[in-house]
Amino acid sequence: MPKRIAIVDIGSNSARVVIFQRTSRYGFHLIAQKKAAVRVSEGSYSNGGYLQEEAINRTIAALKSFKNIIQDYKARKTLIVATAAVRNAPNKEYFLKRVREETKLNIKVIDGTKEAYYGAVAAKNLLPLNINSISIDIGGGSTDIALIQNSKIIDAISIDIGTIKIKELFFDKNLKLEEAGDFIKKEFNKIPQNFKVEQAVAIGGVLRALSKSIIDSSDYSFNKIHAFEYKISEHINHIDDILDASSNKRLNDLNIKESRYDTIKEGVLIFKILLETLNIDKVITSGVGIREGLFLHDMLRGSNGNFPREINPSIVSITDRLDMLELSYKNKIIAAKKLYYLLKNEFDEKEKHLKHLIDAIKISNVGKTLTIYNEHKHAYYIASAELNWKYRHKDMLLIATILRSKGDKLIYKPLKKEHTKLLPSKKTIKWLGFIYTIINIIFSYSSTNKCTFACENGHLIIYSDIELPLFNSEIENLKLLKDFKIVVKTKNT
């Protein structure tokens, strides 16, 4: 697979180009993206589905700009797909021919089930889906749904209902909300019963806008869309307020951004009725969709379409790009596990946080690759921004909080205060910070050290392969969590 791959997605509302850079077998990151509001389906539903000339011209102009970006970044492979508005258009071939002639680009028109499939590929690989889920992607021309069980895509369907279609057939004609609702319900009643699962994955711009609106209108402390979880029942009043909004000013008051004013009510109505039909209350928001799904489908062909269980793509991406020290983490992780198991009864009897500790250690050097000074702060900021894939918000924050630990500040109090509802107790954070700090100090002397630990007579004994002559001075300001001393013994003495 090429190191750089470009994906172009032509939807009913907008067209986007993204460019991914591969950094290793399972490492990748986004290096460029551009969006154009082409509205390729504008006017089509009131004109027999035909793409209108003005919309076609807008789309071709955007594709010419996208081609320049792709050439600038020297992408070695380009995949271009078009979805509902194009596939349903009677003049589809005319549009595709004009694109080929004027841009030299070839578009693959995908059907709705394939569109649902690619969205589900992104969701199952980049979200923490621990229960049976359905991915829901509400576009301008269709609503695409896939059933995900045990990291496998079991089924996919596409329903010919989208925001622009509902807008042009109902909202633009000032018909009552109930009439649009009845039309939508009739179509959704055709959905098979096996799609009634525990959780919905919200994909696409409209549903991300809804999640952002909920975050901004509540006391939720972590302003990140991807992996944001909520229950419909807890925010139904807010959802109904959006549907009842009689002006753009009211939508603004509900924290809906201006670019979504013209389709948010349609999308929220479709989403609400769909979840009512399937009796689903729990939602997790996806910051990824068809574009990431196309990329991952190509990238993971040799891995059955999934990252290996032991691989977290966020960790791989961070270390590939930002950890240039090339030190071995093997012994460091082994030692951290030993110390954790020795002390876990003090704070974590159910062993819920070992993975958080180990993942923090895996990226513990990324801060110093920027600058050695305040490396713990840099590591925290990197983790907060880049730990996206496969983590819940509380996992991202706890790993970042562990990385923020240093010496006399095992817990950064403003951080705990800000995210009280998402982080564990102060006691737990301090113990994890304590273990993390001790391990980092030990292995700052040698990455090959093979140390063991014991608790004897109220002392923490560190048995080290090598001498640690400066260790005691480094822990002078370390605020111990218990009244025990730390004693270092060299194994050969």
Image (cartoon, rainbow, N blue to C red):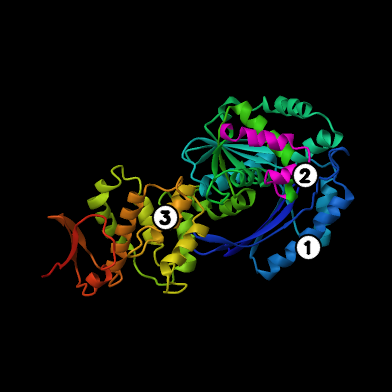
Query: Going by the image, does 129 lie left or right of 114?
Result: left
Q: Alpha-carbon neighbours of circle 2 within 10 Å: few (<14), some, or many (≥20)?
A: some
Q: Is residue 122 left or right of residue 73?
A: left
Foreground of the two, 390 or 457: 457
Which amino acid, by three-letter code, is at mark 2? Asn
Q: Is residue 314 left or right of residue 107?
A: left
Residue toward you, 454 or 6? 454
Q: Is residue 105 magenta?
A: no
Please name the predominant secondary structure of the magenta segment in the image.
helix
| Whether residue 299 is situated above or below residue 368 in the rendered picture | above
Q: Are marks 3 and 1 in contact (CB under 8 Å)?
A: no
Dots 2 and 3: beta carbons under 8 Å?
A: no
**Mark 3 packing: few (<14 Cα in 10 Å), some, or many (20+)?**
many
Residue 201 seen anywhere in this rendered image of the structure: yes
Q: Which mark is residue 64?
A: 1
Which secondary structure lies at badge 1?
helix
Tell me the number on the disc at residue 399. Answer: 3
Q: Which mark is residue 248?
A: 2
Q: What residue range appears in magenta? A: 233-257
The front one of 119 and 409 is 409
Residue at position x 69%, y 70% in the image: 72
Query: Most extreme residue toward the left, as rendered?
Result: 493
Q: Is residue 158 visible?
A: no
Which numbered dot is residue 8? none
Front of the two marks 1 and 2: 2
State yes or no: discs 1 and 2 in contact (Cβ < 8 Å).
no
Callout 3 amino acid: Ile
- Dot 2: what SS? helix
